[in-house]
Image (cartoon, rainbow, N blue to C red):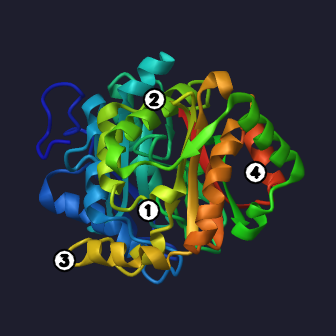
Amino acid sequence: MNDTPASDSPTSSSNFSTTNSSAQTGGTASHAIQCTPVRGWFDRRAFMKLERELYVGDPNWVAPLWSERKQLCGFGSHPFYNDAESEAFIARKNGRVVGRVVAIINHAHNRHYNEKRGFFGFFECIDDVDVSRSLFDAAVKWLGQNGMTDVRGPVNPSLNYEIGLLVEGFDSPPTFLITYNHEYYGRLVEASGFEQVQDVYCYEANMDDLATIDPKLQFVIDEATRRFKVKCRPINPKRFDEDVNSFLKIYNESLQRTWGYVPMSHAELVHQSKQLKLLIVPELTSIAEIDGEPVGAGFGLLDFNQILKTMNGHLLPFGWLKLLRGKKKIDRLRLVSTNVLPKYQSWGLGLVTLARILPDAIDYGIHTGEFSWVLESNRLSRGTIERGGARRAKTQRIYDRKI
């Protein structure tokens, strides 16, 4: 994202400033709402700070890492934007910043689906429909002038990262890299013409309950292991790059028929793995191999939000040390994925990879596990997770609208 108005593709946003007025409650005065593209250091800082201002006093909100959030919003270098365009907008009311949104064009998505779909993300706003409408009007206008015909969101900035608007489960903090927002956000989004297209669920379970595997599921695990002579192992820190490449291959091949799937580039995965390398606990990962070839991968990630909640989004000067020292005190695990190559997906190898992680997670001191996220439309995975004793704890919603 440029600090000065662009003169070539995508369309410059210098003409995207919009002004609305809304009647003051209980009076006749009007308040001007001005929505403008983010330009320069002061705008970027105001954009970033708004999130913290809106959640002051909310016991469940966890500040995202400032440096990583800046990159994902498009204010710094991030490999996602090697194949994407974006424009950020901020809304002011009476001169005070009260809302923000990022309009996103994901070229990888549009090539994969042969669509002209734009996206929105990083939406934050006071409880004011006029403010949210001004933000979405500006974002939709920018996307339309850059050739898009539909818009979907929220994604921060794609389905390979943080997704969805929290609509159920406001009574507890989110796990690491899961979205959180005020309850009124759904009303604001729907007031701008967006309609639900997909829900994603977070399932929660006591680890002791998960360790007591349903007999039918245990039969599937035993049969798949016997039939294919599957061997599971954790990530090998000495072969980290090689194992990361195996994860990427399995991820991209296994999810091709999954709703909303977007191929993750090698550069994106390398970037993410570097960010998470020191945070990954090998024992909480699993690579399933048949004849020495990786065919499935399971990935568990400690809920670092338990530590980040005390850091206000800053890693410096002692944040990294605090994270690393606090790892052993975390008692919650986010089970991010269990992916299997398509030819083996009907044989229960996902359960095999998960079964390798669970005993080590309990030994580590994990009390609670969360499967997140799981598509509402993925009835097979939902049924398996529910049979294993997990309950639905949170729902995030993804919306669509025409431009």
Looking at the image, do the residues carrying marks 3 and 1 touch, with CB atoms under 8 Å apart? no
Q: Residues within 10 Å of mark 2 (few under 14, many from 20)?
A: some
| Residue bearing mark 2 | 249
Inter-mark Cα distance, 3 to 4: 40 Å
Numbered circle sitting on residue 180: none
Earlier sequence position, callout 2 versus callout 3: 2
Inter-mark Cα distance, 1 to 4: 35 Å
Front disc: 1 or 2: 2
Q: In terms of secondary structure, where does tag 4 sit?
A: helix
Amino acid type indicated by mark 1: Cys
Q: In terms of secondary structure, where does tag 2 sit?
A: helix
| Residue bearing mark 4 | 385
Numbered circle sitting on residue 317: 3
Front disc: 2 or 3: 2
Numbered circle sitting on residue 125: 1
Inter-mark Cα distance, 4 to 2: 24 Å
Q: Is residue 233 left or right of residue 313?
A: right
Query: Which quadrant would the N terminus be assigned to in this image?
Result: top left
Inter-mark Cα distance, 2 to 3: 36 Å
Earlier sequence position, callout 1 versus callout 4: 1
